[in-house]
Amino acid sequence: MNPWIGTFIGWCLSWFCGRTHKTVPDVTIIYVKRLFPGWAAAQTWGKIILVKERYAKPSIIRHELVHVEQWKRLGFWGLGFLVQYLWESIIHGYENNKFEIEARERQ
Ligand SMILES: [Zn+2]
């Protein structure tokens, strides 16, 4: 299912924070100067990866590509991932969020 809600948020953030730099099939990678929260190296919104330039390493991109897959897999146009990711973060914290664990294992 196309996670268009997340992709829409990603485009809005990229307009505010950065610039388009490189596209891999079906995914747009945008180098940004800032992210919210500020400590984040990269973020994935639907099929858009926002990454701070100095962190744009293959392992980080591979990690974020797992999140693109999660956005698609959980359906409901991106709402499935958005809601479950926030829920996981509230209950288990960032490090123990099951989506982060999966992305770390496959990065
Ligand atoms: Zn992650």
Image (spheres, helix red, strand yellow):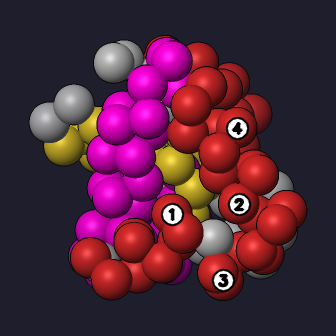
Residue bearing the label numbered 2: 88
Q: Is residue 57 visible?
A: no
Q: Amino acid at mark 1?
A: Phe
Nearest the eye: 104 or 28: 104
Q: Is mark 1 within 8 Å of ligand 1?
A: yes
Give the quarter of the image for residue 65. Answer: bottom left
Residue 95, numbered label: 3
Q: Position of residue 103 (x, y in %)?
A: 39, 71
Looking at the image, residue 32 lies above or below residue 63 = above
Q: Residue at x 39, y 72 (%)?
A: 102
Can residue 62 be found in the magenta stretch?
yes
- The residues bearing labels 1 and 3 have C-alpha atoms spaced at a distance of 9 Å
- The residues bearing labels 4 and 1 have C-alpha atoms spaced at a distance of 12 Å
Look at the numbered disc 4 and give the secondary structure of its residue.
helix
Q: Are marks 4 and 1 in contact (CB under 8 Å)?
A: no
Q: Which region is colored magenta?
A: 50-78
Q: Residues within 10 Å of mark 3 (few under 14, many from 20)?
A: few
Pick whichever of labels 4 and 2 is earlier in the sequence. Answer: 4
Look at the numbered disc 3 and give the secondary structure of its residue.
helix
Residue bearing the label numbered 1: 99
Q: Are marks 4 and 2 in contact (CB under 8 Å)?
A: no
Q: Amino acid at mark 2?
A: Glu
Residue 83, numbered label: 4
Pick whichever of labels 4 and 1 is earlier in the sequence. Answer: 4
Look at the numbered disc 1 and give the secondary structure of its residue.
helix
- The residues bearing labels 3 and 4 have C-alpha atoms spaced at a distance of 17 Å
Q: Is residue 16 visible?
A: yes
